[in-house]
Image (cartoon, grey):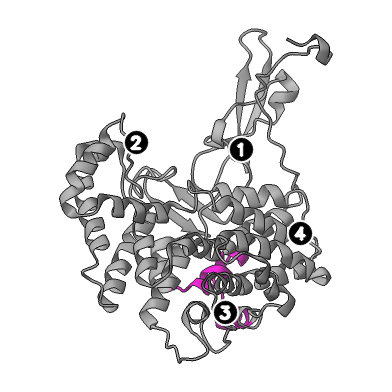
């Protein structure tokens, strides 16, 4: 919606431009700077795109100053308390909560798309036994485009729906196959009688020679983690999916690009870094020492899992996940887990320290998620894979929103060029 104008004047030439101000449902206004290049022959400079709206979206809203996260307008606290991951997936993709029949139909579509083509499953034999699971996940997801030629017309709404069902259904199966390959264990086929998270845990931890019973608390914890990680607005991996998708590439390739972006330790590897930090600190007795190191600008040590690029207040997801962390460890008999006790004590100390209070360095969702994954028996190498399973839903929602936008354009960021000016080629015999 455009109902305001902004006038910009070039003080050197006196030339003026009138820019539209787009008004959001909630949040700051957005200035349409598109005319600047034509009117003034200038681009804007915004490293990291911290002040640039790259698209218009109706999916997720974040108020970082006040610790608010809304999916399609619904607070994350309400979804975490009352919903489940597949219902949240439907909400993100379709814009509204489903009624009973719609949820049943959607869940059925996901359940019955979980199997992988046997040829695709054999791809894993081409990976070395110690290949990183994210490398396998990215590669196999991209290869899905070689199997579904009949339903990859990105301009066909039904094809987009089929893709959404397939990727949400199959990415846990791919993840579990990657895990089993790393162990040298046989692949476990999905079971249609299990819910989404129970099926994932069964594929991870069951073996053909023994019966495996999924712990309902473990499945509940995983479902909550997936809800909390399902979408987070225009983050690096989501923006990557949108940028790749804007070229018109097939959706599996776009999702694979998001997986690769998520693999970066500054993005999807934060919960793994939290566990490594806790292990480095070692015991509660060392907290004071390491907090002092974190405050020393000349020391390389950093408190991982504190602060967030967007949230300048408490991460609302951290409050929710903290309670589940207690529940999981108590149920699994690990309430005396030294890493969790260390995490609680570190949080307590840091939140009372003026240094962290002034800088609003509050615990984020990654601070506890790694501890929960560890308690569930999921190895550290799989943490980012679990993140990718959850975030795939957000990627799908954003990709679909972008493709359905009649005003979609291929992404083409500009640059500030600071290299050499035009110069002549020098023959190699005349170079110093």
Q: Quadrant of residue 228?
A: bottom left
For discs 3 and 2, the disc positioned in front in the rendered view? 2
| Residue pointed to by mark 1 | 3
Q: CA distance from mark 4 to mark 2?
A: 42 Å
Q: Residue at x 61, y 37 (%)?
A: 3
* Residue at left offset 38%, top offset 77%: 218
Task: Determine if residue 138 is in view.
Answer: yes
Question: Which mark is in front, 1 or 4?
Answer: 4
Instruction: Using a 10 Å C-alpha cutoff, classify the residue at mark 1 as few (fewer than 14 neighbours), some (14 to 19) or many (20 or more).
Output: few
Q: Residue at x 63, y 79 (%)?
A: 114
Q: Position of residue 52 (x, y in %)?
A: 57, 36
State the CA–CA distance, disc 3 to disc 1.
Answer: 38 Å
Numbered label tally: 4
Question: Residue 122: x percent and y percent?
Answer: 69, 75
Task: Give the mark nearer the N terminus: 4 vs 2.
Answer: 4
- Examine the residues drawn in magenta and state their main secondary structure: helix
Q: Nearer the viewer, residue 179 or 303?
A: 179
Q: Which type of secondary structure does the marked residue at label 2 adopt?
A: loop
Q: Nearer the viewer, residue 325 or 175?
A: 175
Q: Is residue 228 magenta?
A: no
Numbered range of the magenta stretch:
83-108
SS class of the residue under badge 1?
strand
For residue 342, side relative to residue 415 (left or right)? left
In space, the residues marked 4 and 3 are separated at their CA atoms by 27 Å
Residue 103 - label: 3
Q: Quadrant of the N terminus?
A: top right
Give the number of the mark in front: 4 or 3.
4
Q: Which mark is residue 250?
A: 4
Residue corresponding to mark 2: 300
């Amino acid at each position: 919606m455009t109902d305001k104008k902004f006038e910009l004047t070039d003080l050197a030439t006196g030339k003026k431009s009138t820019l539209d101000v787009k008004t959001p449902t909630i949040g700051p206004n957005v200035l349409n700077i598109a005319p600047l290049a034509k009117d003034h022959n200038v681009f804007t400079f915004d490293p990291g795109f911290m002040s640039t709206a790259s698209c218009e979206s109706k999916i997720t809203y974040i108020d970082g100053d006040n610790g608010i996260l809304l999916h399609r307008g619904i607070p994350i606290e309400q979804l975490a308390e009352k919903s489940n991951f597949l219902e949240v997936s439907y909400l993100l993709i379709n814009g509204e909560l489903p009624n009973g029949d719609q949820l049943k139909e959607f869940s059925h579509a996901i359940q019955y798309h979980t199997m992988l083509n046997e040829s695709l499953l054999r791809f894993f034999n081409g990976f070395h036994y110690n290949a990183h699971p994210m490398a396998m996940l990215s590669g196999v997801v991209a290869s899905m485009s070689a199997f579904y030629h009949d339903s990859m017309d990105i301009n066909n709404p039904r094809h987009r729906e089929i893709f959404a069902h397939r990727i949400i259904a199959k990415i846990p199966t791919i993840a579990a196959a990657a895990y089993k390959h790393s162990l040298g264990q046989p692949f476990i086929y999905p079971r249609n009688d299990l819910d989404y998270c129970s099926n994932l845990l069964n594929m991870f931890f069951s073996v053909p020679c023994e019966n495996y019973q999924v712990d309902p608390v473990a499945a509940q914890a995983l479902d909550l983690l997936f809800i909390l990680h399902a979408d987070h607005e225009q983050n690096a991996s989501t923006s990557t999916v949108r940028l790749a998708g804007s070229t018109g590439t097939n959706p599996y390739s776009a999702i694979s690009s998001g997986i690769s972006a998520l693999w970066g330790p500054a993005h999807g590897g934060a919960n793994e870094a939290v566990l490594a930090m806790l292990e480095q600190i070692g015991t509660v007795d060392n907290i004071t020492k390491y907090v002092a190191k974190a405050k020393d600008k000349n020391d390389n040590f950093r408190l991982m899992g504190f602060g967030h690029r967007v949230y300048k207040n408490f991460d609302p997801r951290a409050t929710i996940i903290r309670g589940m962390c207690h529940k999981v460890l108590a149920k699994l008999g690990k309430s005396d887990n030294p890493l969790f006790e260390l995490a609680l004590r570190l949080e307590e100390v840091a939140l009372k320290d003026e240094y962290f209070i002034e800088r609003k360095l509050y615990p984020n969702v990654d601070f506890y998620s790694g501890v929960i994954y560890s308690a569930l028996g999921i190895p550290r190498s799989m943490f980012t894979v679990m993140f990718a399973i959850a975030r795939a839903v957000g990627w799908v929602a954003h990709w679909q929103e972008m493709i359905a936008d009649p005003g979609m354009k291929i992404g083409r960021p500009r640059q500030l060029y600071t290299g050499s000016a035009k110069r002549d080629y020098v023959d190699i015999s005349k170079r110093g």
